[in-house]
Image: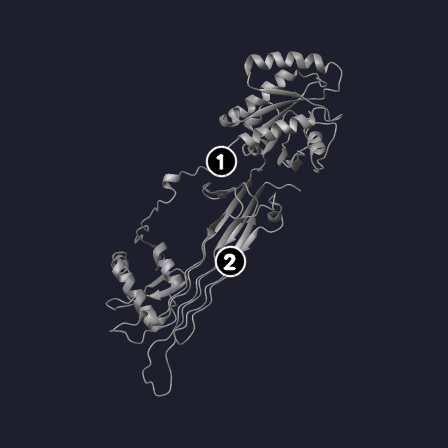
Amino acid sequence: MFVDKAKIYLKAGNGGDGLVAFRREKFIPNGGPAGGDGGRGGDIIFRVDEGLRTLMDFRYQRHFKGNPGIKGRSRGQHGANAEDSYIRIPPGTIIMDDNTGEVIADLTRHGQQIVVARGGRGGRGNIRFASITNKAPEIAENGEEGQERYILLELKVMADVGLVGFPSVGKSTLLSVVSAATPKIGAYHFTTITPNLGVVDVGDSRSFVMADLPGLIEGAHEGVGLGHEFLRHVERTRVIIHVVDMSGSEGRDPFEDWVKINEELKLYNPGLEKRPQIVAANKMDMPDSEQLLASFREQVKAVRPDIEIMPISSLTRKGIQELLYRATDLLDQLVVEPVVEDVPEIKERKVFKLDPKDDDSFTVVRENDEFIIRSEKIEHMMKRMQLNSHEAILKLARILRAMGVDEELRKRGAVDGTIVRLGDFEFEFVEGSSYY
């Protein structure tokens, strides 16, 4: 089954917690703090594997979680960093953030990789908080939570040659004749609803990848008939083989079909108009095809004299080999350029960004006789602090006072014994005290 879109959930590994510990060894009095730091949580990394062709794996597994860092240990030993988690994706995959719609990366080459969710930092052990004034701190930090996000994956087929054209013009039949691919073939429109890939052996030690792209119809660039689902795969092809039903078996005019499809390609992406194109005049074994081909040549020449028209018959295989040779020659003439623009002069330039300034803002809301403090900075800080010691509580109180929380509570009418809620914690406000 061909799957070209997927939405997945990523949660990088949490950092390991720091440890509160003290050195206790014989003949070493007052050994001091010895709690180590926690290890870093594992990143989640996408890596391109050229052996994959679809996003089928994400149909069955949509949640990925990174490995957590190891907790700090006594005797000043740091916890081990977690191993990163690698997720394999096929070449041509676009990675987007589901919430913002931002394109994170467009990976096209084997081995390319990018960190999409970063693991959390490890918490500091109490050995980090020792100072001249506090030689035996009982403070440590919890590990930071790993990055959490929803990701959209979109695959654009990576093929050398793409077959385009109206439904039922013989694209799938042509692919089945020139390669080992076995696309579904039927005498009705939209037999092919997903792209099919096949490796074509030209016979002179050359080969290329051909994609049978589902049939387009008028209005495809606006999404008509799942147009966007089909058209985005054309963008990756280096050469377009435009298959036209030269028999007019369904009462359509071959030239009008050719004009309409080219117009849809142009409206979807103006760059496709300049893509090398060969017109494969198919079904030449049918009656009246020769007369229609002569008229078709004159009409196309008047509009695009550069377009090459090659008569073929997928049924009798007449003209097939010549078409393959011509497509291969075109591919050899083209310079292989990266799909994603890569400007050499700025490739080595390093861009340094300042960390965003901490947001010290907070709000105090009164509900009945209680006060609730809301602040992203304070809540994040409390997640990191291990508030299981008197010293840690004192440190939190000093930070809140420095931010102006005490003064704001007094302005709002807080008195001795007033209940103050902060996240999952509840305190009593004590006037004139150095802590809650």
Nearer to us of marks 2 and 1 is 1
Left-right relation of 388 to 242: left
What amino acid type should be assigned to the residue bearing mark 1? Answer: Glu
Q: Is residue 397 above or below residue 107?
A: below
Counting from the top left corner in percent of width and height, residue 274 is at 51, 25
Task: Give the label on residue 192, or none.
Answer: none
Residue 414 or residue 53, whichever sits in front: 53
Residue 328 or residue 386, whichever sits in front: 328
Quadrant position of the N terminus in the picture: top right
Residue 277: name its quadrant. top right
Left-right relation of 64 to 134: right
Counting from the top left corner in percent of width and height, residue 370 is at 35, 60
Circle 2: is it few (<14), some (14-19), or many (20+) Cα within 10 Å?
many
Q: Which residue is mark 2?
A: 66
Counting from the top left corner in percent of width and height, residue 209 is at 62, 36
Left-right relation of 419 to 220: left
Q: The residue tagged with tag 1: helix, strand or loop?
A: loop
Residue 111 or residue 10, whichever sits in front: 111
Residue 436 at least partly seen:
no
Counting from the top left corner in percent of width and height, residue 357 is at 30, 51
Q: Is residue 380 above or below residue 353?
A: below
Residue 141 at least partly seen:
yes
Q: Is residue 214 above or below residue 408?
A: above
- Closer to the chain start, of discs 2 and 1, is 2
Residue 147 or residue 386, whichever sits in front: 147
Residue 401: name its quadrant. bottom left
Q: CA distance from mark 2 to mark 1?
A: 35 Å
Q: The residue tagged with tag 2: helix, strand or loop?
A: loop
Task: Give the label on residue 337, or none.
Answer: 1
Residue shown at the point (66%, 12%) measured from the top left: 294
What amino acid type should be assigned to the residue bearing mark 2? Answer: Gly
Circle 1: is it few (<14), some (14-19), or many (20+) Cα within 10 Å?
few
